[in-house]
Image (tube, rainbow, N blue to C red):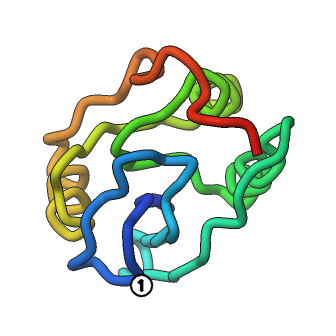
């Protein structure tokens, strides 16, 4: 299972970013290998193609601070699950997720996109 954590910096000590779309980094944890890969957030276009590419890679779990309706809908429609972890470090959020302590989101946490890019 691959889990994406949207973070402020490039380590598990980092805080979960307040806004998914503006997170500087994505930490991708593979529960089979127990390894974490760090990526710089590539930003997004009108079609959220970067998110679609992540799902195509098999990343189906997203731990975030907030999400707008467009990103939520794209991921939800592709079968991905988003989890809210406001105020957590990435390590704390990952631990909580792996222990089934985070609830999946059933809707976006923001009413509109943060901003168009």
Residue nearer the viewer, 92 or 44: 44
Horizontally, is 39 left or right of 45 in the view? left
Q: Residue at x 41, y 16 (%)?
A: 106
Residue 97 in sight: yes
Say which quarter of the image contains residue 75.
Answer: top right
**Residue 12 horizontal/vertical position (percent):** 28, 77
Residue 1 in sight: no
Residue nearer the viewer, 39 or 37: 39
Residue nearer the viewer, 103 or 33: 103
Q: Is residue 107 above or below residue 34?
A: above
Q: Secondary structure at mark 1?
A: strand
Residue nearer the viewer, 85 or 34: 85
Say which quarter of the image contains residue 86.
Answer: top left
Horizontally, is 54 left or right of 113 in the view? right
Q: How many numbered circles does the render carry?
A: 1
Say which quarter of the image contains residue 41.
Answer: bottom right
Q: Is residue 66 above or below residue 19?
A: above
Q: Residue at x 45, y 22 (%)?
A: 110
Q: Residue at x 64, y 36 (%)?
A: 115
Q: Residue at x 71, y 66 (%)?
A: 42
**Residue 102 horizontal/vertical position (percent):** 21, 38
Horizontally, is 102 left or right of 69 in the view? left
Residue occupied by mark 1:
35
**Residue 28 horizontal/vertical position (percent):** 49, 70
């Amino acid at each position: 299972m691959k889990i994406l954590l949207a973070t402020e910096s490039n380590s598990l000590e980092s805080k979960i970013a307040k806004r998914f779309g503006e997170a500087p980094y994505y930490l991708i944890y593979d529960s089979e290998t127990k390894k974490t890969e760090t990526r710089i957030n590539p930003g997004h276009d009108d079609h959220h193609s970067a998110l679609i590419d992540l799902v195509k890679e098999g990343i189906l779990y997203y731990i975030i601070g907030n999400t707008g309706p467009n990103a939520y809908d794209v991921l939800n429609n592709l079968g991905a699950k988003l989890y809210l972890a406001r105020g957590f470090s990435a390590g704390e959020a990952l631990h909580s997720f792996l222990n089934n302590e985070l609830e999946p989101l059933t809707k976006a946490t923001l009413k509109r996109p943060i901003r168009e890019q």
